[in-house]
Image: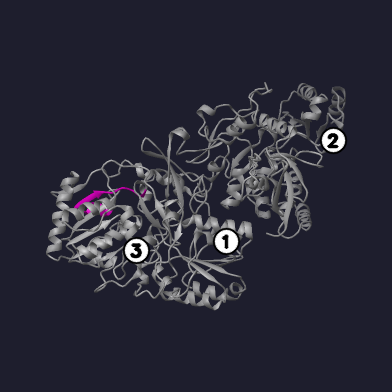
C-alpha cells in the first residue's frame, strides 16, 4: 500500500495508511488503547476520555480515537501520565455509577467492569452522595437506568446513524445529563435493541432478558434467524433449555452485529404455551392427542394405501424448514408417490432471474454487495420494513462511501431520506426505471434490489435494461422468509426439481390448484398454513400437517405432527441473496421432532430407502446433486456464508407471475409466527408504533 | 406557530449566514430570539423550529437543555444565575449561591410569586477568569461578593 505513515508506539515502529486513527493503528500493532465512546463504523465522539495517550511534543494528553497518525509521531500508551489519567477518568465515571454489578444484567460482560478491573483504582476518593434517578421503561423492550450511564453516545449514534431512526438523544447538562427517548417518556422506533447491545454498561437493558440469567450461565449457539430472508446470524443464549437472549456480539455471520427486533427478541414463539407437544389424530371428528407410535402407524397405513392405489397426492412445503428438509420432502413425494404436485408459497421470481442471467457470471448480488456496491437501485420494496439487514447495509454504504441510491417504490420509504433520487411508481416501475437510465448509466456499477412487483416479463425487461447500461450490474430478488429461497432451489415446485431442472413427466399442480382440486386423496402440508384464508376443495382428502402450532390448516387436518422449530434443528438455509448458512440446534421442545426425522420415520415405516436421514448426509446429497450447492464445507461449518448459483443456463419454467406474491410483512410481523411472539405483539400495541 | 413579522425577518436573515444544507446551525440564535418573544422555549416552539430546520424535536430539546440561557418555562423579570462550577466554587460561588437563596427566599429553578425574581444554580457560564460570576438575564457580573450581590439585587427595580 502506498502512502504509509511511519510512527512509533511504545518504542515499536508502526506503519499505517494516512488518515488512520491512532487507536486503530495501535490495534494493528497489537497495542490496546482502551475506549468506551469510540466505535468502529460510527462517527467520532471523543466523549469518554479513556483513550488519552501521550504524544511527544503535544502539550497535553491526546484522545487517540480522533488523532490521525502522522509521520514521525512518537506515542506512548502506558507511560506514567497515561496510566494516571486512565485511573482518574475511571474514578470520574464511577462517581455516580452505582456499584450494583451483582444485580446488573451487564455484570460479567460489562466494559466498564472490565476496564476498572484492568486499569482502575479499587478505591475512590469521592465521598459525596451519588446522584440517583429512578429507572425508566421506554418501550416493551427498552429500559433505561440513568445512573449507570456513562454518556458515551454509542446508543445515540447507532440509532441516528446506524438505524437512521434518531430516537435517542442526550438532554440537559453536566451531572444531570441523560439519554432521552424521542417522544417524552417513550420511544417511537424500530425496537431493534441495537442501543441495548451497543451499551458498554448496563444503562440500557432488554425487557426480554432482564433479570433472567447471568451471561456465564447461558450456553451460546450461533444459528440463523428464522424470520425474514436476510439470513442474519443470531447467537441464542439458552439457560435450562430455554432461549433467553438473542444477539450477535461476536459479529459472526453476514450481518456482523446487526439484528432487528425479530432476530433479537422474536425467538419467544419457541416457548409459546400453545406449541404442540404431541401428535393430534382426528377421532370422531375431533383432534385428540395420541402417542407418536400410534400417529406413525396411522400415517404409514394411510400413505401405503394411497401409494398402492396410486391415489392423488398434494404436497405443500415450507419457507422456513431447512434445505435438507425441503430436498427430502420433494424427493419423498417424487419417488414414493410419483407425483409432481409439490409447491410452496412463492414470494419472489428467482427462477426468471436465474434464467434471464443465464450465461452471465457474478450477476447475483450478496448481502455484502449492499455495503460495497458503488450504486444501488431499489425497486418496489420497503427494505427498512421487510429486509432490515439489507437496508442497514445500504445505509452503512451511504454513510461510509456516500453511495448514490435510487429508489422506485409505490409509497414513501426510509431510504428516500438518503437517496440520490426517489421516485414513486407501483405497477409502472419499469417506466420509472427507464427514466433513470441516463443517471444509472453514469455510475460505475449497480446493484438492483427488487421486490415481488418485478417478475416474469417485467423482470426480463429489467435485466435487458441492465445489460444496456454498459456497467456491471448485480441483482437481488427479494423473498419473504428464512428459507423461501432454499425452497425454490430445492425444487418445491410443480414444474422444477432441485437446481431448477425440468421435472420428469408432466408438471404437477400449483398450490392454488391443489387447494381447489376436488379429487386429492392425500394432502401433506409441512410447515405451511395455506388454509389461513382458503378452504380445501377436496373433502375426501386425508390431511397430514407437520407444524409448530395448531394453525388454521392444522384445524382441518386428520393428523397433526408436532414439528421442531428452526432453532431446534441442524441443517442449512439459503437467504434471499442465495447465501447458504448453517442452522445450529439451540433448544428442544418435548414431544416435537424435526421434519427431517419425521420423513425418516415415515420412510422406514413404508420400507422405503431414502438414504441415511440426517442433516449432514442429506446436505452431502444436495452438494452432489443440486447445481451451485457444491459450496466449500469449511466455510459454512465455521459459521460463514457461501453464495450459490443454483443454475447457470436456461431454466425450463413457465413462471406464473400471478403466483408470486410477498406476504408484505412489516418489521413487527412475521407471517404465521406473528401470533405466537409475545414481544412482537407487545411492540405493535405499545404507545410508540412504527417509525417510517 | 406564528411569530411577529420582525422576528420572521430576523430568522430569514439569519438563515442566509449558513451554507446550503447547514441551516441547522441557526438553531441557537433562533431559539434565543424566539425565547425573547414567546417568553420560554415551549414544546410548540421546539417542534416549529425542528420543522423549519429539518431536524428532530429531540435534537432541538438536546440544545435547549444544554444551554443555561434557554428556558423551557417562563422565568422572573430578573433571572439570576449563580455559577457554582469548579473555578467559581473555589472562589466562593457556593456561598454566593446560598446567600442568593436566603436573600431572594428562592431555591434552584424557583420563581417568586410576584414574578420579579427567579433563581438558578448553573454550570460554568464561561466567566472563570473573573470568578465567582453571576448572570442576570443577559448581563454578567464579575468577582461578585455577598455584599456586591446585595447591591446588584437591590439595584434591580
At 87% from the left and 22% from the top, the residue drawn is B147
> What is the spatial separation of the Cα atoms under label 1 and label 2, in whole angstroms?
54 Å
Residue A455 placement: quadrant: bottom left
Q: Which range of residues does the magenta coloring cover? A: A552-566
Q: Is residue A70 above or below residue A401?
A: above
Depicted A325 relative to depicted A338: above or below: above
Q: Nearer the viewer, mark 2 or mark 3?
A: 3
What residue sits 59% from the left and 27% below the top? Answer: A98
Mark 2 packing: few (<14 Cα in 10 Å), some, or many (20+)?
Answer: few
Q: Chain of mark 2?
A: B
Picture coordinates of residue B103 (x, y %)? 79, 22
Q: Earlier in the sequence, mark 3 or mark 1?
A: 1
The local secondary structure at tag 1 comes to helix
Which chain is indicated by disc 1?
A
Residue neighbourhood size for the residue with mark 1, other residues' Cα within 10 Å, grouped as few (<14), some (14–19), many (≥20): some
> Do the residues at discs 1 and 2 belong to one chain?
no
Residue A278's place in the image compared with A349, above or below, is above
Residue A152 place in picture, x, y as percent: 64, 40
Which circle marks residue A624 in the picture? Answer: 3
Picture layout, residue A469 above or below residue A406 = below
Q: Which residue is mark 1?
A: A372
Amino acid at each position: 500500500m502506498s502512502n504509509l505513515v511511519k510512527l512509533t508506539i511504545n518504542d515499536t515502529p508502526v506503519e499505517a495508511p494516512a488518515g488512520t486513527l491512532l487507536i486503530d493503528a495501535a490495534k494493528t500493532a497489537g497495542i490496546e488503547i482502551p475506549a468506551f465512546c469510540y466505535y468502529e463504523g460510527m462517527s467520532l465522539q471523543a466523549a469518554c476520555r479513556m483513550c488519552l495517550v501521550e504524544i511527544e511534543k503535544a502539550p497535553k494528553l491526546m484522545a487517540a480515537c480522533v488523532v490521525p497518525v502522522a509521520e514521525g509521531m512518537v506515542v506512548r500508551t502506558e507511560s506514567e501520565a497515561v496510566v494516571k489519567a486512565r485511573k482518574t477518568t475511571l474514578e470520574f465515571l464511577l462517581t455516580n455509577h452505582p456499584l450494583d454489578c451483582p444485580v446488573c444484567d451487564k455484570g460479567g460482560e460489562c466494559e466498564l467492569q472490565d476496564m476498572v478491573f484492568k486499569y482502575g483504582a479499587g478505591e475512590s476518593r469521592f465521598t459525596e452522595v451519588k446522584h440517583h434517578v429512578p429507572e425508566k421503561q421506554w418501550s416493551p423492550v427498552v429500559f433505561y437506568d440513568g445512573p449507570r450511564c456513562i454518556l458515551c453516545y454509542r446508543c445515540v449514534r447507532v440509532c441516528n446513524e446506524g438505524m437512521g431512526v434518531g430516537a435517542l438523544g442526550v438532554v440537559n447538562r453536566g451531572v444531570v445529563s441523560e439519554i432521552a427517548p424521542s417522544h417524552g417518556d417513550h420511544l417511537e422506533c424500530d425496537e431493534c435493541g441495537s442501543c441495548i447491545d451497543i451499551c458498554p454498561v448496563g444503562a440500557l437493558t432488554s425487557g426480554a432478558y432482564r433479570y433472567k440469567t447471568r451471561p456465564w450461565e447461558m450456553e451460546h449457539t450461533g444459528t440463523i434467524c428464522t424470520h425474514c430472508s436476510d439470513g442474519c446470524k443470531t447467537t441464542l443464549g439458552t439457560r435450562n433449555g430455554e432461549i433467553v437472549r438473542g444477539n450477535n456480539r461476536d459479529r459472526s455471520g453476514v450481518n456482523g452485529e446487526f439484528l432487528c427486533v425479530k432476530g433479537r427478541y422474536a425467538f419467544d414463539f419457541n416457548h409459546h404455551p400453545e406449541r404442540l407437544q404431541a401428535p393430534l389424530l382426528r377421532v370422531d371428528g375431533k383432534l385428540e392427542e395420541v402417542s407418536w407410535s400410534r400417529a406413525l402407524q396411522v400415517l404409514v397405513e394411510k400413505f401405503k394405501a394411497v401409494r398402492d392405489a396410486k391415489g392423488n397426492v398434494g404436497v405443500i412445503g415450507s419457507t422456513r424448514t431447512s434445505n435438507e428438509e425441503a430436498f427430502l420432502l420433494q424427493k419423498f413425494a417424487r419417488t414414493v408417490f410419483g407425483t409432481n404436485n409439490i409447491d410452496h408459497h412463492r414470494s419472489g421470481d428467482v427462477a426468471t432471474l436465474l434464467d434471464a442471467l443465464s450465461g452471465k457470471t457474478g450477476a447475483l448480488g450478496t448481502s455484502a454487495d449492499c455495503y460495497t456496491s458503488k450504486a444501488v437501485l431499489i425497486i418496489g420494496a420497503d427494505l427498512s420494513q421487510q429486509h432490515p439487514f439489507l437496508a442497514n447495509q445500504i445505509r452503512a454504504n451511504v454513510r461510509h462511501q456516500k453511495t448514490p441510491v435510487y429508489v422506485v417504490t409505490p409509497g414513501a420509504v426510509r431510504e428516500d431520506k438518503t437517496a440520490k433520487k426517489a421516485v414513486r411508481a407501483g405497477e409502472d416501475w419499469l417506466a420509472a426505471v427507464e427514466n433513470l437510465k441516463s443517471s444509472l448509466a453514469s455510475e460505475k456499477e449497480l446493484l438492483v434490489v427488487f421486490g415481488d412487483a418485478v417478475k416474469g416479463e417485467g423482470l426480463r425487461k429489467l435485466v435487458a435494461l441492465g445489460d444496456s447500461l454498459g456497467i456491471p450490474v448485480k441483482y437481488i430478488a427479494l423473498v419473504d422468509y428464512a428459507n423461501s429461497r432454499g425452497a425454490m432451489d430445492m425444487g418445491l415446485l410443480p414444474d422444477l426439481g432441485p437446481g431448477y431442472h425440468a421435472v420428469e413427466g408432466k408438471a404437477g399442480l400449483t398450490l392454488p390448484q391443489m387447494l381447489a382440486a376436488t379429487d386429492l386423496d392425500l394432502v401433506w402440508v409441512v410447515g405451511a398454513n395455506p388454509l389461513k384464508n382458503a378452504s380445501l376443495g377436496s373433502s375426501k382428502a386425508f390431511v397430514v400437517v407437520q407444524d409448530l402450532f395448531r394453525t388454521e390448516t392444522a384445524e382441518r387436518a386428520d393428523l397433526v405432527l408436532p414439528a421442531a422449530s428452526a432453532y431446534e434443528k441442524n441443517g442449512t438455509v439459503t437467504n434471499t441473496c442465495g447465501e447458504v448458512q448453517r442452522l445450529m440446534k439451540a433448544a428442544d421442545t418435548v414431544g416435537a421432532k424435526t421434519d427431517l426425522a419425521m420423513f425418516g420415520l415415515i420412510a422406514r415405516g413404508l420400507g422405503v430407502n431414502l438414504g441415511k436421514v440426517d442433516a449432514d448426509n442429506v446436505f452431502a446429497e444436495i452438494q452432489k446433486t443440486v447445481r451451485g450447492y457444491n459450496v466449500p464445507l469449511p466455510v459454512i461449518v465455521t459459521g460463514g456464508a457461501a453464495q450459490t448459483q443454483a443454475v447457470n443456463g436456461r431454466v425450463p419454467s413457465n413462471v406464473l407471475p400471478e403466483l408470486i406474491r410477498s406476504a408484505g410483512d412489516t418489521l413487527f410481523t412475521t407471517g404465521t409466527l406473528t401470533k405466537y411472539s409475545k414481544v412482537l405483539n407487545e411492540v405493535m400495541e405499545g404507545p410508540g408504533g412504527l417509525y417510517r | 406557530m406564528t411569530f411577529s413579522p420582525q422576528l420572521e425577518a430576523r430568522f430569514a436573515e439569519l438563515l442566509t449566514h449558513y451554507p446550503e444544507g447547514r441551516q441547522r446551525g441557526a438553531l441557537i440564535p433562533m431559539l434565543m430570539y424566539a425565547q425573547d418573544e414567546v417568553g420560554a422555549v415551549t414544546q410548540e416552539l421546539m417542534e416549529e423550529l425542528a420543522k423549519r430546520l429539518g431536524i428532530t424535536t429531540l435534537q432541538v430539546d438536546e440544545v435547549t437543555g444544554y444551554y443555561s440561557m434557554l428556558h423551557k418555562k417562563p422565568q422572573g423579570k430578573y433571572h439570576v444565575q449563580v455559577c457554582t462550577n469548579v473555578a467559581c466554587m473555589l472562589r466562593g460561588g457556593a456561598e454566593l449561591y446560598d446567600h442568593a437563596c436566603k436573600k431572594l427566599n428562592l431555591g434552584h429553578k424557583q420563581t417568586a410569586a410576584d414574578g420579579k425574581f427567579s433563581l438558578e444554580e448553573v454550570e460554568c457560564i464561561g466567566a472563570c477568569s473573573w470568578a465567582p460570576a453571576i448572570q442576570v438575564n443577559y448581563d454578567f457580573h464579575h468577582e461578585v461578593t455577598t455584599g456586591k450581590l446585595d447591591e446588584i439585587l437591590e439595584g434591580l427595580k
